[in-house]
Every structure is written in structure tokens, then in C-alpha cells.
Image: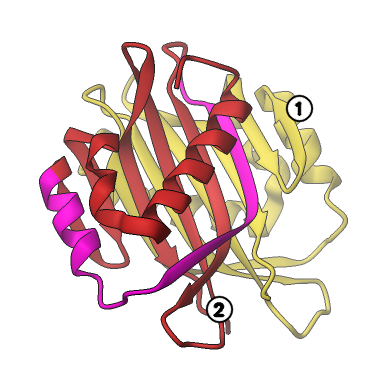
Chain colours: A red, B yellow
């Protein structure tokens, strides 16, 4: 991905990310670096290898993300972008989707971007 | 707020923010600067004055935020912090709370912090 308008970047990144996640999440490592951080529910890890190990270890096989809302803002004058996604997650043979929220902090690097911050939480209703 | 552990900062900031929002949201201006950005649902604005005008114009009087989940990560080596909140919002005389997600990007400034990025979205179920 070359540097581009932050809304276009946010849209293209999230479409790519969830497509790859849902097809084969073991291949997401290129998006993370040694300083990348993942919070997945209450688990925290750092570094591309730890992050991919965590994602691969999640106890589901089939997964489908559906984006409900997507918003982005420039996060500094350096070209980094914050993205907030809300959406639905459908797992394995479950019939009921779960609502989730995820924030990505995308950092420019060369002609592309990587994920510095990634926080994922399921949303539980009252 | 002096500089502190990012989890403590995130907790203290969000507690202060929502308490002040729910008591009198016209007084939140000190937390924003000229470069601060707010996305509230599909509305976007920039700068402390525009942000407060937007918040004050929201069509409810009584409001109560309840935090369900709160996670934070350092967003650079400069001390800025990203916070993802999920929670419930109870408005006026409504009986049913609405789920929401909000991300704050907190920037160090002198001995304290200000909000550079603020994205708020309601979560609608399937």
C-alpha cells in the first residue's frame, strides 16, 4: 500500500486485514513488527511472532468478520492513522454473531504501513 | 495529570472524562487543543471550540456512561497512549442502554495530556 488518503488507507487496510484473517490468519505476520502490540480481550502480547502465535491459537476454525462502522483520523503529522472498527464476528457453527470493536494504529514505513497498536474487544450487551 | 503508567493514565483519564461529560460536557474544552479531532458517529470536527460545540449540541440532557471494558497501549516512544473503551450509554428517560465504543489518543503536553484523537460510535447489534 502506498501512502494515501487516511480514509482510503483505513478502508483498504481493514478489508485486506479481515479477508486475510478469515482465510488464513497465520499469514498476517507481515503486518506487524517487533514493536507491535496486540490486546485481544484481556491478553496482551508484543512482536509479530507472539502476535501471530496468539491469533493462530484462538479456539475457532471458521471465522467471518463483518464491518458495521469504520472511522479513521490522522494520528500525527507523520502520516500515522488511527482506525476504529465496530462489527460482527461469526465463529464456526454458531448462528449468533458477536459484536466487537477493534482499533488499529497504522504507522508509515517505506512505501507502506504496519500495525503498531491493535486492540480487540467483544462487546457484551447489558 | 502527571506522566504515569499508561494503564493508570487510561483509567484516570476515562473516569474523569465521563464524570465531567455526564455532569457538564460544556467543560471538557480543556482536554482538547487546536489540532484535536472528534468523530462522533458520522460527524467530524476539529479544534477544541468546534468539538465542545458539537458535544453541547447533542440532543440529550441527562447522560450516563458506564465503562464495560478499558484497554490501553503506548502509541509511540513519546509517551502518547491509545485507549479503547467499550461501554453503555443511558440517555434521558430511556430505559435501554446503548452500547458504544470510543477510542482516545492521549498526547503528553507539559506535565499532563490532551486528547488528539477521539472517535465515538454506537454499536448496533445484528
Q: Is residue B31 visible?
A: no
Residue B14, compared with residue A108, is above or below; it is below
Q: Residue drawn at (69%, 69%), measured in percent from left and top?
A: B124
* Foreground: disc 1 or disc 2: 2
Q: Position of residue A43 (x, y in %)?
A: 21, 64
Q: Is residue A113 visible?
A: yes
Marks 1 and 2 in Cβ contact (< 8 Å): no
Q: Position of residue B82 (x, y in %)?
A: 38, 41
| Relative to B81, B41 lies left or right | right
- In 3D space, how far apart are the residues under numbered discs 1 and 2 (Cα atoms)? 37 Å
Q: Residues within 10 Å of mark 1 (few under 14, many from 20)?
A: some
Quarter placement of the N terminus of chain B: top left
Q: Nearer the viewer, residue A12 or A43?
A: A12
Residue B28 occupies quadrant: top right
Residue B90, compared with residue B24, is above or below; it is below
| Relative to A104, A109 lies left or right | left
Looking at the rendering, the stretch of residues picked out in magenta corresponds to: A49-76
Q: Nearer the viewer, residue B84 or A23?
A: A23
Q: Secondary structure at mark 2?
A: loop
Q: Which residue is mark 1?
A: B50
Q: Position of residue A104 (x, y in %)?
A: 42, 42
Magenta highlight on residue A55: yes
Q: Chain letter of disc 2? A: A
Magenta highlight on residue B104: no
Q: Nearer the viewer, residue A16 or A77?
A: A16
Q: Which residue is mark 2?
A: A97
Q: Residues within 10 Å of mark 2 (few under 14, many from 20)?
A: some
Quarter placement of the C terminus of chain B: bottom right
Q: Residue drawn at (76%, 27%), measured in percent from left and top?
A: B50
| Relative to A14, A57 lies left or right | left
Amino acid at each position: 500500500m502506498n501512502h494515501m488518503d487516511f480514509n482510503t488507507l483505513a478502508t483498504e487496510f481493514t478489508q485486506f486485514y479481515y479477508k486475510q484473517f478469515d482465510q488464513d490468519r497465520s499469514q498476517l505476520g507481515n503486518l506487524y513488527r517487533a514493536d507491535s502490540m496486540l490486546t485481544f480481550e484481556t491478553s496482551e502480547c508484543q512482536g509479530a511472532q507472539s502476535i501471530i502465535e496468539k491469533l493462530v491459537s484462538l479456539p475457532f476454525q471458521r471465522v467471518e468478520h463483518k464491518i458495521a462502522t469504520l472511522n479513521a483520523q490522522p494520528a500525527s503529522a507523520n502520516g500515522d492513522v488511527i482506525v476504529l472498527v465496530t462489527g460482527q464476528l461469526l465463529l464456526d457453527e454458531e448462528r449468533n454473531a458477536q459484536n466487537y470493536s477493534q482499533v488499529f494504529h497504522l504507522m508509515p514505513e517505506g512505501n507502506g504501513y504496519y500495525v503498531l497498536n491493535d486492540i480487540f474487544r467483544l462487546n457484551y450487551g447489558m
